[in-house]
Image: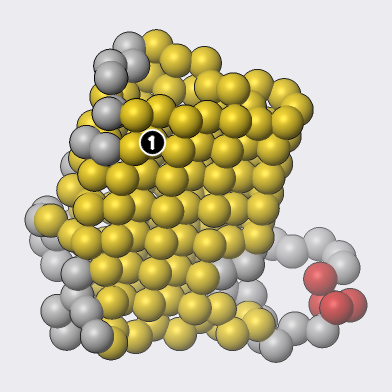
Amino acid sequence: WTKFENITIVTNTADNELVYGERAWVTCYEQNNAHHTVTVKDGTLRIEINDETEWYEHIGINLGSPKITVCLPKGHYGNLDIIGSTGSVTVSAAFDFVAMDIALSTGDIRLQNISVQQLRLSVSTGRITVNHVECLGNLDIHVSTGKCELTNVTCQNLKSDGNTGDGACCTDGIVH
């Protein structure tokens, strides 16, 4: 692998998971005609969807959900940016990022045991669960329709908004 500091994932329906390992690797479980490209350029690991499916191929029963797994060794990383339509994002290893920006249209975001300077999370419909996270700066959360739950989280500033459901986060153990 070429060295990288930042990670960008742009997908449509895949579940995304960051896990700890001794070396960096990426696996993509994909559907026909919807493949991901994985490149490293200018210090950024970039995973992008190349969806060539026709609209009618989305109708029917699909066995298994697309999934992207990114394995990273311990260390300090720059920015993590994830943009997706539907699916989930799970980061549960002891990672240290400068900034994280995760935005899903429909899905769940689960973060646990991480350290970050700036954190921005957004779901239109879904759930955000943040547990044992140290945010040294701003923590911005937006949930249009869904629920947000923060437990044992520290941050300098917290901004949370939503339209329907439990968009305003319920918090336990927030320290400013």
Nearest the viewer among 161 and 67 is 161
Total tally of numbered discs in the picture: 1
Whether residue 46 can be seen here? yes
Task: Classify the position of the N terminus by image quarter.
Answer: bottom left
Residue 174's place in the image compared with 24, above or below, is above
- Residue 62 lies, in percent from the top left, at 74, 64
- Mark 1 residue element: strand
Which residue is denoted by mark 1 in the rendering?
139
Q: Which residue is drawn at 61% across and 44% down?
A: 123
Q: Which residue is drawn at 39% across and 69% down?
A: 8
Instruction: Judge left or right: residue 148 versus residue 74.
Output: right
Q: How is the image coloured?
A: secondary structure
- Residue 115 lies, in percent from the top left, at 21, 40
Classify residue 151 by image quadrant. Answer: top left
Nearest the viewer among 19 and 84 is 84
Residue 40's place in the image compared with 112, above or below, is below
Classify residue 155 by image quadrant. Answer: top left
Instruction: Judge left or right: residue 109 versus residue 145.
Output: left
Nearest the viewer among 129 and 156 is 156
Furthest residue toward top: 172
Amino acid beneath label 1: Leu
Q: How crowded is mark 1: few (under 14 residues within 10 Å), some or many (20 or more)?
A: many
- Residue 69 lies, in percent from the top left, at 39, 62
Instruction: Judge left or right: residue 32 versus residue 110.
Output: right
Q: Residue at x 50, y 36 (%)?
A: 141
- Residue 27 lies, in percent from the top left, at 38, 71
Task: Classify the position of the C terminus by image quarter.
Answer: top left
Residue 164's place in the image compared with 15, above or below, is above
Whether residue 14 can be seen here? no
